[in-house]
Image (cartoon, rainbow, N blue to C red):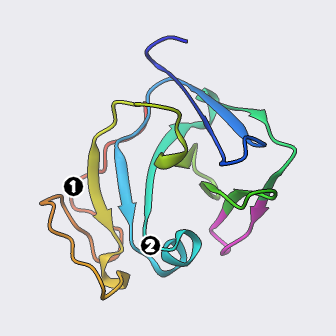
């Protein structure tokens, strides 16, 4: 693998993926759906569809969580893996599913108006109440 190739997968190994290209910095999403899906908040990177490929996907399941997006998870172990918006040319990847060090940085927090009341955000990163930023979130390659 080159320095720009990343791999990852679920807890049990039934779903594996590879990204041949750059990954977007990590975005922390505090929306109600992400909190319910992960048990806290989602930390996700992203890759262009053309750079992403599944290596093992027999247990990959998709849940249409809204009219605008679906969520991918392992049907065997239940690991949260992906978030995919309709009509976008990238797939969001749960950052914790990457194998080893990925050299990623953190970009921002989105949907902070929905965050849980049991924690505070004090890391100094930009925050958006609803996910819309006046400054652009760094794009994937």
Q: Please report the residue visible at 28 percent of the width from the left and 48 percent of the height from the top.
A: 106
Q: Secondary structure at mark 1?
A: loop
Q: Which mark is residue 135?
A: 1
Q: Please report the residue visible at 28 percent of the width from the left and 40 percent of the height from the top.
A: 105
Residue 36 % position (x, y):
55, 78
Q: Does the magenta portion include 64?
A: yes
Few, some or many residues within 10 Å of mark 2 (<14, 14–19, 20+): some
Q: Residue furthest front?
A: 12
Residue 110 % position (x, y):
33, 67
Q: Quadrant of residue 15?
A: top right
Q: Which mark is residue 54?
A: none
Q: Quadrant of residue 103?
A: top left
Q: Residue furthest right?
A: 58
Q: Quadrant of residue 66?
A: bottom right
Check the picture and name the quadrant holding the C terminus: top left
Check the picture and name the quadrant holding the N terminus: top right
Of labels 2 and 1, the one closer to you: 2
Taking depth in this image into account, of 45 and 103 the one nearest to the observer is 103
Residues rendered magenta in the picture: 62-70
Few, some or many residues within 10 Å of mark 1 (<14, 14–19, 20+): few
- Cα–Cα span, label 2 and label 1: 25 Å
Q: Please report the residue visible at 74 percent of the width from the left and 57 percent of the height from the top.
A: 77
Q: Secondary structure at mark 2?
A: loop
Q: Which mark is residue 40?
A: 2
Q: In the drawing, does residue 42 fall left or right of residue 60? A: left
Check the image and report above or below for 71 versus 92.
below
Q: Residue furthest bottom?
A: 117
Q: Please report the residue visible at 15 percent of the width from the left and 60 percent of the height from the top.
A: 123
Say which label, 2 or 1, has the lower sequence index: 2
């Amino acid at each position: 693998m080159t320095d720009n190739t990343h791999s990852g997968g679920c807890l049990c190994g039934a779903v594996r993926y590879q990204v041949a290209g750059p990954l977007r910095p990590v975005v922390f999403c505090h929306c109600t759906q992400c909190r319910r899906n992960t048990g806290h908040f989602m930390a996700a990177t992203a890759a262009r569809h053309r750079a992403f490929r599944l290596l093992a996907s027999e247990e990959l399941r998709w849940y249409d969580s809204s009219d605008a997006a679906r969520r991918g998870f392992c049907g065997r172990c239940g690991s949260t893996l992906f978030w995919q918006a309709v009509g976008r040319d990238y797939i969001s990847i749960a950052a914790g599913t990457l194998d080893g060090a990925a050299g990623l940085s953190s970009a921002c927090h989105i949907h902070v108006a929905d965050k849980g009341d049991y924690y505070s955000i004090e890391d100094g990163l930009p925050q958006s109440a609803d996910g819309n930023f006046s400054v652009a979130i760094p794009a994937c390659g």
